[in-house]
Image (tube, helix red, strand yellow):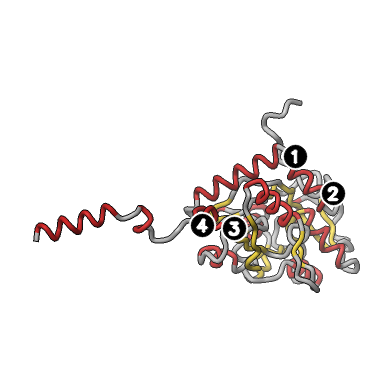
Amino acid sequence: MKKLLLSLFLITISLPAWAGDAKESAFDRVMRTGVIRCGYYVFPPMTSRDPNTGTLSGFSVDFMNHLAERASLKIEWVEEVTFGNWVPALQARRFDIACTPMWPDLPQAKVAAFTHSMFYAGKYLAVMANDTRFSNKTKLADLNNERFTFVAQEGNMTFTTTKIAVPNAKLFMLAANADPGEYYQAIVSKKADAVILDTNAVQQWNINNPKNMMKLLDITHPVTYQQFPLVVGRGENDLLMFLNLAIDEMNNAGEINSLLLKWEAEPNKTYLRVTNPAKVN
């Protein structure tokens, strides 16, 4: 019996380190295969899809291609997701990174890990352009009462931001799987009066909906500032550090600024850049 136990012990300690691993980390899989699998959602100018060819383009595509070239890796765009289903898809390891920037908030940080922000955007009050109740002098505090209804969405930071910014206003809640266009449709149909969004969201809506244009109020005083990070699964610390280094390098080298200038609807007006901490004024 002692000889049997000794033999089992010797076999156990002689096994390779990976034999006891429950699963391979995303970073180790990327290093082994040389491929980053990207999940994405369609939201111009971050990620666009040609309706005829299915070809993807946009800031996110260029950014990930630059990253892959720097690191001698390849990118595969494996799954399109929505605001409502990206978390379970990431947890199921169907892709390694949510490669279209997501809107982070603390509840989501319980189930996903966010990188450094690639850039920022101010978030403002947005209403119908022809709504005479509001002017450029309308302030956030003017709408913080039960006479006004704001659009928010389950499962993302629009709910958190709106509840903090206008706690006394009513909410018109969209389902977690709602399309981004439903924010505006709720206001067009008068189910809500306002929404808190960034400049690009309103620019993209106005480009495609000239008969129902939106306007931003009090643009010198953002309600808050929105981060734009990539997302990996909780516990994927090696991959998170790898992406943070890539983001910092590309920001410091001016590459992210160049990509934003290429894709912004209004160059230098849509997004806010990350300042290089070592830059001397």
The extreme top residue here reads 280
Secondary structure at badge 4 equals helix
Q: Categorize mark 4 by other alpha carbons within 10 Å: few (<14), some (14-19), many (20+).
A: some
**Which residue has dot 4 on it?**
29
Which comes before the other along the chain, label 1 or label 2?
A: 2
The residue at which mark 1 appears reads as: 254
Q: Position of residue 100 (x, y in %)?
A: 67, 58
Give the residue number, with chain letter if any, for mark 2.
137
Q: Are marks 4 and 2 in contact (CB under 8 Å)?
A: no
Tell me the distance, in whole angstroms, between the alpha carbons under discs 3 and 4. Answer: 8 Å
Q: Residue 122: where, in percent of width, then height?
A: 74, 48
Q: Separation of disc 3 and disc 2 at Cα? A: 51 Å
Dots 1 and 4: beta carbons under 8 Å?
no
Secondary structure category for the residue under label 2: loop
Q: Which comes sooner in the sequence, label 3 or label 2?
A: 3
Closer to the observer: label 1 or label 2? 1
User: Looking at the picture, which amino acid does disc 3 mark?
Assistant: Val
